[in-house]
Image (cartoon, rainbow, N blue to C red):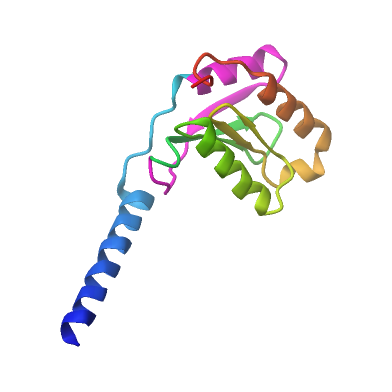
Amino acid sequence: MRVAVALILLVALLYSGEWVYRSFIRPIDPLPPEIAALADHFERNGIKVSPFAVRHGFRHSEVQAVAAFKVAELPIPFIVIVCPDSRSAAVRLAGLKGDGVRSAGQNGRMVLDLGLWAHDDQERAAKIRALFETFEGEMTAR
């Protein structure tokens, strides 16, 4: 019985250690090149944004990087999640929509999450989502 309890505690310790590493210790992932291209796309179309990398606790097999885009007039940035491929991006999008978020979209391996402000400012949210969906970066075709 002691051996079973020790094994259960060891497994719990390993999982919690992995979670702590991914959530707090692992360095922030650098922004991939398509994020800079997406920021340029937004700016060419009249939305001034400044992207920055965000710490995330996902495994790299699920999410490769997370970028927040700060819009000058908005208090809260919107998020773009970069997944390894378009199939994992579709899974991530389905998870967002399962939370009741209507202001999310997918473009290749990137997923857009506008957050809660999109419900109050639907006009700007629709413009950002339309620009995101029309973006054709060379890196999104993977």
Seen from this angle, which residue lies furthest left?
Answer: 3
Q: Position of residue 10 (x, y in %)?
A: 22, 70
Relative placement, left or right, of 42 versus 1 is right
Q: Tell whether 7 sits left or right of 127.
A: left
* Residue at x 62%, y 37% (from the top left corner): 77
Q: Return the residue nearer the eye: 69 or 62.
A: 62
- Residue 55 % position (x, y): 43, 43
Quarter residue 27 falls in: top left
Q: Nearer the viewer, residue 22 or 60?
A: 60
Question: Residue 71 at what x, y percent from top left?
Answer: 65, 30
Does 15 sit above or below residue 138? below
Q: Residue at x 62, y 46 (%)?
A: 94
Considering the image in quadrants, where does the N terminus appear? bottom left
- Give yes or no for residue 44 being in the magenta stretch: yes
Residue at x 66%, y 21% (from the top left corner): 48
Q: Quadrant of residue 63?
A: top left
Pick the front one: 48 or 38 = 38
When the figure is inspected, residue 129 is found, relative to residue 34, above or below; the finding is: below
Instruction: Please provide the residue range marked out in magenta.
Output: 34-60
Q: Which residue lies most toward the right here?
A: 123
In this rendering, the count of numbered labels is 0
Work out whether 91 lies above or below 141.
Answer: below
Query: Is residue 56 highlighted in magenta?
Result: yes
| The residue positioned farthest toward the front in the image shown | 87
Q: Position of residue 79 (x, y in %)?
A: 58, 37
Vertical order, 96 against 42 (above or below) = below
Residue at (74, 44) in percent of width and height: 102
